[in-house]
Amino acid sequence: MDVPGILHADLDAFYAAVAVLEDPSLAGKPVAVGGGVVLSCTYEAREFGVRGGMRVVDARARCPQLILVDGTFDAYTEYSRKVFEIFTSFTPVVEPISIDEAFLDVTGSIHLFGSPEDIARQLRSDVREQTGLAVSVGATTRKFLSKIASQVAKPDGMIVVQPGGETAFLHPLPVSYLWGVGPVTKRKLNEFGLETIGDIAEISVQSLSSMVGPGAARHLHALANNRDARPVEYSREAKSVGAQSAMRAQRRTMEELAPVLQLLTDRVASRLRKKARSARTVTVRVRFGDLSSVTRSATVATPTASTSALVHVARKLLQKVLDEYPKHEITLLGIATTGLGVDEPIQLAFGVDDEALGGGTPEELEAQALDASVDELRRRFGRDVITHGSDLLSGRTDHTDGLSDVMTRDD
């Protein structure tokens, strides 16, 4: 028998909620977390039109009494860890989407914990009692529908769509609830008189293609007709490890960004080594003041977890972005590593430029030994016991507003 066994759990205003828990005096006030760009904000701030991704200067214009909080990275990850422990206490089939949301397949847990509705209700209660955070949950028979249901349920709510009731729930909703419908696509659809998801379901794919293109048309038409066969995917192994830093919007040079990139890469590399993993692909992401973003990637011949090796590749990629977009203001810099495998001895053959980087050279063996020494010092005395001199000399805190790790499968 089909049951609404796919849950989408989404923590409400996660970063802002954690900031309030860490400083209770902020409760009930318009609070935003971020620096140059709002990462998250309380619902009191949202009443003034403040939204995530908005420039802080624009947010302050809408809400002059807005309280800006940098937040604490360690607190965010610790709260997230506790929440995901609660998720996995109900089912091992958990697919993290980010640090504050995940899909859960609870169909195999019904005999232990009751119906999906019972599980969703208990999950929400456990998260509230054990962390103080509110989580909205959607429970349906499809992944995309569960995500929509959790959106509709916000803030701090739960919606269960029983089998057979999917169309009645889905079709009256605005088209903006569908995955893949952003402001531009929404405007196009609305111009053609398509206001609800039901409108998309009723129109032919051919007609829809003329509005949004054939690929998007097939995708949107399938979702509008409740077709989504994707299972909840889970793995005990990380698929990626990354870190990113928000910053005040302004044009930046490599000299300004290099210390930030060094810090981010150091975090990523040390996490890889801690988990005895190595990475084959390095990706640098840059977000601009207009909220657009670009990524540049390079794949190495042999996986590595060397800080110096990853920094070398990341700098090349970042320089490409700066050369291509010299006049753009930058608001976020991130690095991610993928193609993870069991950590191996360093054998560098990057192929990102003409510079020869021989594996097993004395320089690389020295770098490997240095990484091991730094890791041991941090293990014994804490992460802040040692840092890069460039961080101290550059005045990094003058242009970095927030540091966060990108959620991975094994965190």
Image (cartoon, rainbow, N blue to C red):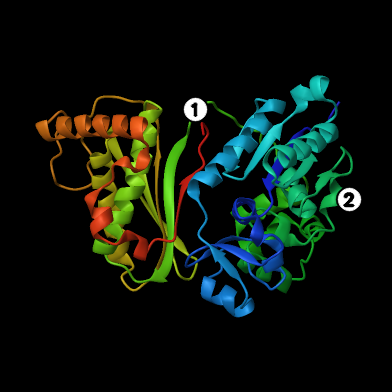
Whether residue 330 is visible, yes or no, is yes
User: Mark 2 is on which residue type?
Assistant: Ala
Q: Amino acid at mark 1?
A: Glu
Q: Tell me what residue is drawn at x 32 percent, y 43 percent.
A: 266
Residue 209 disc label: none
Residue 162, image x and y in percent? 87, 39
Determine the secondary structure under disc 1: loop
Along the viewing direction, whichever of 218 and 400 lies nearer the viewer: 400
Q: Provide residue 76's location: percent of width, then percent of height.
A: 55, 46
Report which residue position mark 1 lands on.
237
Crowd band around label 1 with a 10 angstrom C-alpha radius: few (<14), some (14–19), many (20+): some
- On the image, the x and y values in percent for residue 148 come to 74, 50
Residue furthest to the left in view is 362
Left-right relation of 340 to 15: left
Callout count: 2
Q: Nearer the viewer, mark 1 or mark 2?
A: 1
Q: Is residue 124 above or below residue 391?
A: above
Q: Quadrant of the N terminus?
A: top right
Q: Is residue 329 visible?
A: no
- In the rendered image of this protein, does residue 145 appear above or below residue 361? below
Q: Position of residue 195 (x, y in %)?
A: 78, 66
Residue found at x 55% / y 27%: 235
In the rendered image, the residue lying farthest to the top is 111
Which comes before the other along the chain, label 1 or label 2? 2
| Closer to us: 32 or 286 | 32
What residue is rendered at 58% in x and 36% in y? 81
Residue 64 figure quarter:
bottom right
Location of mark 2 (residue): 168
Horizontal relation, residue 378 to residue 26: left or right: left
Q: Under tag 2, what secondary structure?
A: helix
Residue 316, relative to residue 371: is it above or below? below
